[in-house]
Image (tube, rainbow, N blue to C red):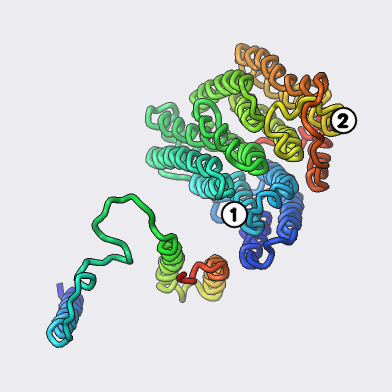
Amino acid sequence: MSDLALMAPELILIGMALALILVARRIRTAPVAAIGTVSAALAAALASGWLLSRGTDTGFGGMIILDGYSQFFKILIAGSLALVTLLSVRTIAVEQLPRAEYHALLLLASTGMMLSVSATDLLTLYLGVELMTLCSYILVGVTVQNPRSNEAAIKYFLIASFASALLLYGISLTYGATGSTTFVAIASALAERGLANSPLLVVAVSLLVAGLAFKIAAVPFHSWAPDAYQGAISPVAAFLAAGSKAAGLAVLGRVTVVAFGSEAEVMSLLFAGLAAFSIVVGSILALAQTDMKRLLAYSSIAHVGYALLGLMAGTPEGVSTTMVYAFFYVFMTLGAFGIVIGLGERGESLEGYRGLATQRPVTALLMLLFLLSLTGIPPTAGFVAKFGVILSALRAGHPELAVLAMVFSVVSAFVYMRVAVLMFMEEPQEEVTVDLPVAVSAALAVAALVTLIGGIFPGSLVRWAVSP
Amino acid sequence: MNEYIGIAVSVGMAGAITAIMVWLGSSLGKKNPTAVKLAPFECGQDPISLPMGRLAIKFYLTAILFILFDVELVFLYPWAVVYRTLGVLGLVEMLVFLGILMAGFVYAWDNGALDWK
């Protein structure tokens, strides 16, 4: 297969982004940008699946790879792109955002994610991650008239560029120690020269993991996330919480298993620390939030902690549980954000959910489904995901982390059930809001379907979640 | 050392021509000095000022557009050197690259980045 054909999903997204940029001034009000983005995302997902059906391959001299792992995440990223586009429809109209530019940035950010999940070279990886974050900075600050959004964008920019510097420093140290940036070559150099656990390499690996931990907002590298989510418009916050975290976890997974297999001990220790801190800090700080987007931000920090439990094992089975976690997490968090977006102004604060069940029973039930899934209660997908990673932590010989994860699931249950109690057991105080837009309802239906099917047929996804 | 003589000659000639032009301009041209004319200038900005205050956004846009063409040149030069070995595929790839860059330029043009208002 030719090199370019391997990148078909990325090329589809880039092509649509360029087309939108070229006609930007002529489609200021038409919905064509959203339709184009959703169809490009679906085409990219189909192309990813079709490529996988033709077997695995590498391209561009071993810089990118086509395997089950990369295509799994590419389909997930394309799905999150399509859902976020649907969720953005009303927000764009209300905020009067430039449509073509907004969708082009979403498309290019997703391209970066796709490139990074198929990267088998540290430089391709960096290129993909940077493309993703560069577009994200602009998306966070896309409401230029809103000072809060500008502040969020500046904070995000400063902290994330610092993280990029750490990542680059880690890459350069790895190159210095092993003489290569390709994953396979790094692994063989480590094995041949017996560099395992040398101090230089420990520093290099730590810097790489720290740089990527910033991108997925794992504690102690999480400080930007709540502010960025709160300042950004809700669909962008959903995009950051869903797609970029999945891509970051995918990159960490491949680097851990393929490149630094010999550093398993250091990696495991780093991931254990990140996971434990993220779960504890994310769950506890979520308790204190009254702003829904900040609450979901801290919840996403805690969820990254759970997902890292799978990577901690360093085994293919462990990585596979993280893949399942990332997949279901994307859909349930997009669902919860979707309700926040659908309720408009009212959905942004916790108080807005008071008595929602008597006013909008279906919306309240959907929100309950996503909250149950985020807590990890059967029969939702969240339970399957959490069960997998906790089992993986037990198998990896970390019973203390498994216990910690379960204890803090209970703490997070209090966070999520607080919203449910407000919805179902309190009297409404606010006026009934406008109906959910059709596009948002469609996105919510997809998210709810995946959350339910994933919970009822837990084995349905495991077959596809193959570690690299 | 011989191969450097040509470079030395061209540097000398370039310097001489520039010097002659400056000298001709300053000796033959009319002079009507005013305070504004004699002030040092740098792209519309006061060159000696505190780095605060506002800057017209049009300078920023021009600088960004400059980077667009700068990046283009950075890639065109090495491509031109190995043009013959790359063949038709190299030409097509460069055209695609230029097309993508030009898409950005067309966007900026279309949205009024070149209108000096």
Determine whether, in the image, residue A356 is placed left or right of residue B72. Answer: right
Q: CA distance from mark 2 to mark 1?
A: 51 Å
Q: Are marks 2 and 1 on the same chain?
A: yes
- Work out whether residue A398 or residue A30 is closer to the camera in this orientation and state it: A30
- Work out whether residue A292 or residue A49 is closer to the camera in this orientation and state it: A292
The residue sitting at 67% across, 43% down in the picture is A235
Where disc 2 sits, the SS reads helix
Residue A40: quarter of image: bottom right
The residue sitting at 38% across, 27% down in the picture is A199
| Kind of residue at disc 2 | Pro
Q: Position of residue A325 (x, y in %)?
A: 70, 30
- Work out whether residue A240 or residue A346 is closer to the camera in this orientation and state it: A346
Give the mark nearer the N terminus: 2 vs 1: 1
**CB of mark 2 within 8 Å of CB of mark 1?**
no
Residue under label 1, please give it.
A59
Determine whether, in the image, residue A10 is placed left or right of residue A187. Answer: right
The residue sitting at 59% across, 54% down in the picture is A59
Q: Position of residue A404 (x, y in %)?
A: 62, 14
Q: How many marks?
A: 2
What numbered label is drawn on residue A361? Answer: 2
Would residue A77 be seen by someone viewing this image from the given angle? yes
Q: Position of residue A245 (x, y in %)?
A: 61, 37
Residue A189: quarter of image: top left
Q: In the current view of this chain or complex, which residue is farthest to the bottom?
A: B28
Binning the other alpha carbons within 10 Å of mark 1 as few (below 14), some (14 to 19) or many (20 upward) gives some
The residue sitting at 71% across, 45% down in the picture is A84
Binning the other alpha carbons within 10 Å of mark 2 as few (below 14), some (14 to 19) or many (20 upward) gives some
What numbered label is drawn on residue A148? Answer: none
Where disc 1 sits, the SS reads strand
